[in-house]
Image (cartoon, coloured by chain):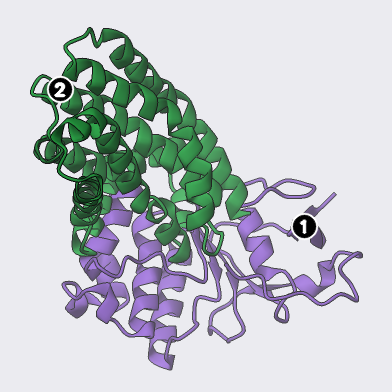
Amino acid sequence: MGLACGRGGLPVLEGVRFTLSPGEAVILRGPNGSGKTTLLRTLAGLQQPMAGSVACAPDSIAYGGHADGLKTTLTVAENLEFWAGIYGGGDIQNALQAFEIENLRDRMAQNLSAGQKRRLGLARLLVTRRPIWMLDEPTVSLDAASVALFAAAVQAHLDTGGAALIATHVDLGFDAGTLDVTLFRASAASGQSFDEAFL
Amino acid sequence: MIRLFVRDLKLAIRAGGGFGLGLSFFLIVTVLVAFGVGPDSATLRAIAPGILWVAALLACLLSLDRVFQLDFEDGSLDLLVTAPIPMESVVVVKAAAHWVTTGLPLTLAAPLLGLLLNLAPAGYVWLVASLALGTPALSMIGAFGAALTVGLKRGGLLLSLLVLPLYVPTLIFGAEAVRRGAEGQAVATPLILLAGITLGTLALLPFAAAAAIRINLR
């Protein structure tokens, strides 16, 4: 039996079954509202599966959603140091360098551009030091150069034995498997339209 | 854990009005009552314990909707739930930060406002003691209410309706302790009951609040 998950009590996906090995990246594909966010939130332990189970431990997953979890009245470095502290002390210097926001470290997050905020949100993944990244549309509001930075960070993460599950509509330019969520659309959901499951 | 506490304090201070908002509200309510009741010092003296406690309660309520709502809106709450710290302790830490930014300043400022309301001299010690014992319960019950309403648009009013009835026991015993203290009677019973309420809420509500947050995030 595969994993089934739903949103607002309605089943969205069922029979989802896949494995993610160390060093492997899988891209989630599917049109808006097809259940990518719901699947990621279920896998990350933010909501209960309607059926089935997730084999990996919740504390091995670093989740990155639509919102970056930034505090606008804290500086870039303070935001990152907070998450580093919560997750047990990753090195923020590397994370700042990887996303080229080192020169912004003393800037208030409220004064960052949308793309810079997103880069800061993604830099958080590096300080969590968790092996599995689950990212929901990570490239939103990033320019081409920043997408390349992000792709390089994911590649480096994979090279060190990490894994990544990424819902995205753009081509990230590295080797990755693809999981098309439309194949798992729950029978009750077909024929109905769904709002994009963001939050 | 400590980082979350420090961050919440920092946010409260930088956002402006962290410490000041509740405190000035407390001041204004008390002064308004003094103006409204008039210059009869005997009447003021009689109602002072109740007024001070009601004002403290309302001031506490003012910043409650921000305990979890801001973290919910910017996505930090999702990340905190998946972080390697138990949600129960996140709730306790957030309630503690709320207490330091509202309950503690209220407790320290209360004697000054007692003066304004002509509180009997013997009551000051018990005013501070009862607020120090009772306001942690206000923050904890408030955090529970905030956890129940997190994610609701304009949940602030609902939060007040949920939380205020739960504040009644704390109000009764808190004001009673001050009244008895001011009249020179024994204050042990209401103070012990007040401490009991505080300890009870601290022991039980973190679990209820954490469960409410998990459900609301789904």
Residue B86 on image: x %, y %: 45, 38
For chain B, give the colour: green
Q: Nearer the viewer, residue A14 or B163?
A: B163
Would residue B98 be seen by someone viewing this image from the given angle?
yes
Point 26% across, 32% down: residue: B47
Q: Is residue B5 left or right of residue A198?
A: left
Q: Amino acid at mark 2?
A: Gly
Q: Is residue B114 left or right of residue A14?
A: left
A104 is higher (above) or lower (below) than B120: below
Let me know if marks 2 and 1 both belong to one chain. Answer: no
B44 is higher (above) or lower (below) than B186: below
Q: Is residue B165 left or right of residue A93?
A: right
Point 70% across, 80% down: residue: A32
Q: Local crowd at mark 1 within 10 Å, few (<14), some, or many (≥20)?
A: some
Q: Tell me which chain the residue with mark 1 is part of.
A: A
For chain A, give the colour: purple
Residue A193 on image: x %, y %: 82, 77
Q: Which mark is residue A17?
A: 1
Q: Which mark is residue B123?
A: 2
Q: Amino acid at mark 1?
A: Arg
